[in-house]
Amino acid sequence: MWFDLFDSQIKKSPCCGNGGAKGDGLREIARLLERGPSSVSKVLHRTGGMQPATRTRSSRVLSLEEREAISRGLASGKSLRAIAQEISRAPSTVSREVERNGGIVRYRAAAADQTAWNRAMRPKVCKLAQRAKLVKTIAKKLQGQWSPQQIAGWLKRRYPDDERYHVSHETIYKTLYIQTRGVLKQELLSCLRTQRAIRHSRQSSKKTGPGKIVDAVPISERPSSVEERAIPGHWEGDLIVGTNNSYIATLVERHSRFVMLAKVTEKKTQVVIDALIKQSKKLPPELYKSLTWDRGSELADHKRFTVATDIQIFFCDPRSPWQRGSNENTNRLLRQYFPKSTDLSEHSQADLNRVARQLNERPRKTLDYETPAERFEACRAAIA
């Protein structure tokens, strides 16, 4: 069942949980499970986006392997005492196990193990559910725009010797987001600074917008010869976006307007950088000297690209797409082949190569109606 797969995934890499623990975003989990984000969201809302506690099995209880040994022993006609000796358990333990799960004839290990697992659940009463006065105090502070962390710290300072008033900020968050606890009203969520209806991890909600790329080399440091377009080998790049989080990396050579397209499965920096490194190996170093990109998070790992290719990346100023004018214009031309609101993941790399070839073989007014392919091949011949 897909819910079981999701449940294991959220425990491994929570979308939201434990003080903003590092985890995948909702869309990443949905893509992994091949489900729509809305389906995953419904499951997340059951626990308010909080990471479910990991259940563990006591070493004192029978394991699935031991139950399978019991099942095999019964099938082969062994006595309960012989089976108990074989798995190093008391005969009474084996006897009770078989009796409560259908008897000798109907005993099945998998069903018995699942029944025991379900029976072992013991709902624990939330601490705040037992402290009406504490709940009233917390609600009043939340209405006063206090954060859960401020409330928890203030309570410990106000009542240093009374543990009945000591509560962690995580308990307050959980009680707010997990409404099944029935303690703090959902309306109090609007008192939080974020006013979110579900907990988000710091990793998935981390802002990596303009100016957030570490050690980015600004376009102002790009050599003036690049601006003049007189020397080939300087490129501009970007991603065009489709539905279902689908992307295509677009590269345009400034001198010849020659286009290259690369298929990328997602926007994560590792995926995009790998695709750009692969594309760079298709050209001689003389025809790939620099790359100008906007400040998207997909190039956060730009240093790895430069180390692998010896190609310097320059980043445009925030909200200045005109600084990559050739690439912006090419992206508009590409929409003829890849319309907006379509799934770009349906196109193979061969499809992208075919589109790039068509663009490169179309005469361009800016090149005096020479084709980008002709201009680029002239540059290639000059360095041969």
Image (cartoon, grey):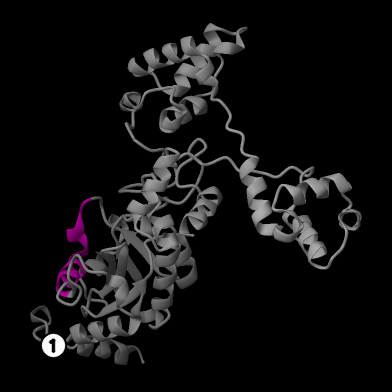
In the image, 96 versus 6, the foreground residue is: 96
Quadrant of the image containing the C terminus: bottom left
Left or right for 209, reference 337: right
Residue that appears at 25% across and 90% down: 378
Which quadrant of the view contains residue 227?
Answer: bottom left
For the point 32% across and 62% down, which residue is it? Answer: 245
Say what secondary structure mark 1 lies in: loop
Residue 344 position, x and y percent, is 28, 71
Q: Main secondary structure of the magenta part?
A: helix
**What residue span does the magenta drawing correspond to?**
319-333
Q: In which quarter of the image is residue 119?
A: top right
Residue 342, placed above or below residue 218: below
Q: Can you say whether 302 is above or below 334 in the image?
A: above
Side of 372 relative to 289 (left or right) = left
> Residue 250 magenta-drawn?
no
The answer to whether residue 279 is above or below residue 14 is: below
Figure disc tally: 1
State the image coordinates of residue 196 (x, y, percent, origin top left): 34, 35
Q: Dot 1, crowdedness within 10 Å: few (<14), some or many (≥20)? A: some
Give the amino acid at mark 1.
Glu
Residue 137 at what x, y percent from top left? 43, 11
Q: Does the magenta stretch include residue 322?
A: yes
Residue 139, image x, y percentages? 39, 16
Position of residue 148 in the picture relative to residue 92 (left or right): left
Q: Is residue 70 or residue 324 the one in the foreground? A: 70
Q: Quadrant of residue 229?
A: bottom left
Which residue, given by chain and number where applicable, does mark 1 sit on?
370
Instruction: Judge by depth and name the residue closer to the eye, 197 or 275.
Output: 197
The residue sitting at 32% across, 56% down in the picture is 296
Q: Is residue 234 at all visible to an observer of this figure?
A: yes
